Amino acid sequence: MITEINVETGEITQREMTAEELAQYEADQAEAAAKKAEAEAKETARQALLDKLGITRDEAKLLLG
């Protein structure tokens, strides 16, 4: 559902998404999920490296900063 609010009149209208809006919404959701999965994979790899080196994130920042 799409909610449209006319700020001048305060009128609130709700309507179904058009096919184009629904397709865009689904594409945006898929892109967001892919970005989240990528970020989680990077964080897992970062943590694995820190564990392998036996240092904390703060210690890594001190070494690289």
Image: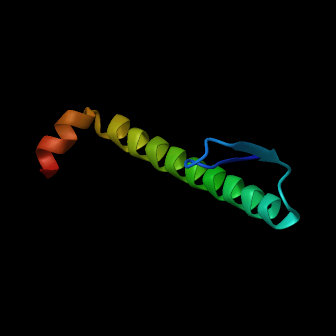
Which quadrant of the figure has residue 18?
bottom right
Q: Is residue 2 left or right of residue 18?
A: left
The residue at 74%/63% (across/down) is 24
State whether residue 23 appears in this view: yes
Along the line of sight, the residue nearer the viewer: 35 or 4: 4
Q: Residue at the far bottom: name it.
A: 20
The residue at 28%/33% (across/down) is 54
State whether residue 1 appears in this view: no
Expressed as whole percent of the image width and height from the top left, the position of residue 41 reads 53, 48
The residue at 60%/48% (across/down) is 37
Q: Is residue 22 left or right of residue 32?
A: right
Q: Quadrant of the N terminus?
A: top right
Along the line of sight, the residue nearer the viewer: 61 or 25: 25
Expressed as whole percent of the image width and height from the top left, the position of residue 47 reads 40, 39
Along the line of sight, the residue nearer the viewer: 40 or 15: 15
Q: Is residue 47 left or right of residue 19?
A: left
Q: How many marks?
A: 0
Q: How is the image coloured?
A: rainbow
Along the line of sight, the residue nearer the viewer: 47 or 16: 16
Depicted 58 relative to depicted 6: above or below: above
Q: Is residue 51 left or right of residue 23?
A: left
The residue at 50%/49% (across/down) is 39
Expressed as whole percent of the image width and height from the top left, the position of residue 8 reads 55, 49
